[in-house]
Structures are given as C-alpha cells and as structure tokens.
Amino acid sequence: MVFGLFKKKKTTRKKTVKKAVRKVKRKVVRKVKRKTVSKVKRKTVKKVKRKTTKRKGGKKPAFGGYKIIPDAKLAVIIGNKPLPPSQMTKKIWQYIKKNKLSNR
C-alpha cells in the first residue's frame, strides 16, 4: 500500500480545457470591466474651460513678426512694403492669375 501514496493524479483533457476556458473568460471580463470603468470615468469628469487671455495687440503676428523686404524687381509685383511670407505668396499668386502666367 505504500505505492498507493505516490500515485500521480490523472488529469483529463476535459479538466485542462475547462481551466483554459475559465482563464480566457476571466481575461475577457477584466478587459470589459476596464473599458466600462474608463467610459464611466470619462463621463463623470467635468471639462475644465481654459481661461483665455486677451492680447493687447490683437492677433499674434505671423512668423513671430518676421517680414521680408522686397527688392526692386519683386517690388513691381507685390509693392515696397515689408510683408510676411504668407502675404507675399498670396500677392504673387494674384499677379500670376491676373496676367495668366500659369500653365494650368
């Protein structure tokens, strides 16, 4: 009877499959709980409005106030005043469209 104490327990396939299924179910349930909890948290958190500070000068200058002074040839097209690059590009395109210089 001494040999009876050292017998290995027989685990059937059904038991191991059931354990694996339980583990998967637990993981799925945990993920679902996390998602629902995060959704609830999102709904309960109030949105805080940022305080807007008004600037004295109005709009922020384009390119940090960077302006290009046109040379004599370019001054014919866009004028003599210093302009930011975005405004200069707009004026150049106006000139191109006005004189039909585009290949479109």
Image (cartoon, rainbow, N blue to C red):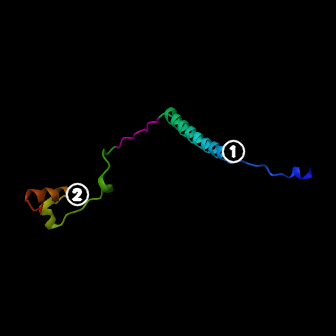
Q: Is residue 61 left or right of residue 30?
A: left
- Residue 40: image location, x then y, percent: 52, 34
Other-residue count near label 1 (Cα within 10 Å), few / some / many at <14 / 14–19 / ≥20: few
Q: Name the residue: 92% across, 52% down.
A: 2
Of the pair 60 and 32, the residue shown nearer to us: 32
Judge whether residue 84 can be spotted in this image: no
Q: Which residue is mark 2?
A: 83
Is 8 magenta? The answer is: no
Circle on res. 3: none
**What type is the residue that disc 2 sits on?**
Leu
- Residue 75: image location, x then y, percent: 14, 63
Of the pair 91 and 20, the residue shown nearer to us: 20
- Outermost residue, right direction? 1
Q: Which residue is mark 1?
A: 15
Tell me whether circle 1 and circle 2 mark residues in contact (CB < 8 Å). no
Q: Secondary structure at mark 2?
A: loop
**What type is the residue that disc 1 sits on?**
Lys
Q: Name the residue: 79% across, 49% down.
A: 9
Secondary structure, magenta segment, majority class: loop
Q: What range of the chain is rendered magenta?
A: 47-55
Q: Give the distance between the C-alpha atoms of the residues marked 1 and 2, in whole angstroms.
A: 79 Å
Of the pair 87 and 33, the residue shown nearer to us: 33
Other-residue count near label 2 (Cα within 10 Å), few / some / many at <14 / 14–19 / ≥20: some
Is 50 magenta? The answer is: yes
Of the pair 84 and 47, the residue shown nearer to us: 47
Q: Is residue 23 left or right of residue 48?
A: right
Q: Name the residue: 65% across, 43% down.
A: 18
- Outermost residue, left direction? 99
Q: Earlier in the sequence, mark 1 or mark 2?
A: 1
